[in-house]
Structure formats: structure tokens, C-alpha cells
Image (cartoon, helix red, strand yellow):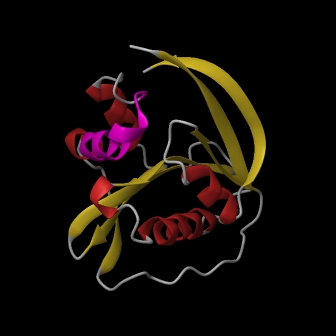
Amino acid sequence: MAQVEIQTFYVEMLAPCPRSVPSPRDGLAVVRAVRPTVAFYRFFYDVVGEHWNWSSRKKMADAEIAAIIHDPKVEMHVLYVEGVPAGFAELDRRTEGEIELVQFGLLPDFIGQGLGKYFLQWTIDKAWSYQPNRLWLHTCTLDHPAALPSYLKAGFVLYMQETSQRDI
């Protein structure tokens, strides 16, 4: 294991940012996974996060994961490309008045096809459909290099940044 310095960026939207992102191709569908199994959730978390050192949920027991993903105010949405799972988004509405985009990403085979921009906008629109006061997320320098620029381009604004050390 090596210890690295990481920058964590916290971004938010306090109002919807009108933006239209056309579908980059035919055959796209976003489906809510209602009460997903822990194995299904872990598949996405592990495959999407593999190259970006996602680890927080890996440390959690299955019962802890189930308690989160089965909460009616936590939603898992899956992007499918011609019937093949391509990415997922996790929205957490458990805090009154705000929504956290907890997880967001594409499976490696689908990166670089314009799907991320489309799916991010779909996810933002879904979050604002609940009329929160705030939509927020955090990302860091270990995530895909396009993550922070994509969030900023989508209308999020940086409100906090911190530096920490982490073993990877």
C-alpha cells in the first residue's frame, strides 16, 4: 500500500440548471432498481469504482449495504445500452430538503461514448423532480479525470475543497 495525497471537491446546485443533453445513441434506457440485491449493487460499485479506488462501501457488511439501498429514500438507477448494464447512479434523499448524488459512474466498456454526460443530466433531472433545496456530491482526484469538469459543466458549483492522505 502507498499513501497518496488526495483533493476532495464538494459541489452543489441550489436550483436546477436548465440544460438539454441529447441522447448520444439509440437503445438507451434508465431503469430504477427497486430493492436491488446487495450482490447487484456490489457488482456496479466494484466494477465502476475499480479503477478509481472506491473503497468505502467495500468495507461495509452486507447488512449495512442492504439497510442503505433498501431505504425507500435511496434510489439506484441503472443505465442500459441495448439491454446491457452500462452505469449506475445512487441518489440519497434521506436528509430533508437535499439530495446527495452518492455514486455515479459508467462501466469501463462504456466510458468515452458520450453516455456519461447524458446519464448525468438524466440523474440531475431526476433529482430535481423531487424539488429539493439542494443537490450535492463530492468527488476527488482519484476519480476519473473528467469527473469534476463534468459536474461543473453540468451546473454544479464548488463550495468546499479539502486535502487528505489515503492508503491505496
Does the magenta-highlighted stretch encompass residue 51?
yes
**Residue 73: x and y, percent?**
49, 49
Residue at image x 66%, y 78%? 19
The magenta span reads 42-56
**Residue 84: x and y, percent?**
21, 67
Q: In the drawing, does residue 37 fall left or right of residue 66?
A: left
The secondary structure making up most of the magenta span is helix
Q: In the drawing, does residue 51 fall left or right of residue 91?
A: left
Q: Quarter of the image for the N terminus: give it.
A: top left
**Residue 76 is at least partly visible in this image:** no
Q: In the drawing, does residue 35 fall left or right of residue 17?
A: left
| Count of all numbered marks drawn on residues in the image | 0
Residue at image x 20%, y 72%? 83
Looking at the picture, does residue 20 appear above or below residue 116?
below
**Residue 38: x and y, percent?**
25, 39
Residue at image x 49%, y 72%? 118
Does the magenta-highlighted stretch encompass residue 5?
no
- Closer to the camera in the image, 143 or 136: 143
**Residue 95: x and y, percent?**
63, 42
Looking at the picture, does residue 79 appear above or below residue 94?
below
**Residue 146 is at least partly visible in this image:** yes
Q: In the drawing, does residue 47 fall left or right of residue 126?
A: left
Q: Quarter of the image for the C terminus: give it.
A: top left
Q: In which image quadrant can residue 33 be found?
A: bottom left
Looking at the picture, does residue 122 appear above or below residue 10?
below
- Closer to the camera in the image, 127 or 162: 162
Residue at image x 33%, y 78%? 28
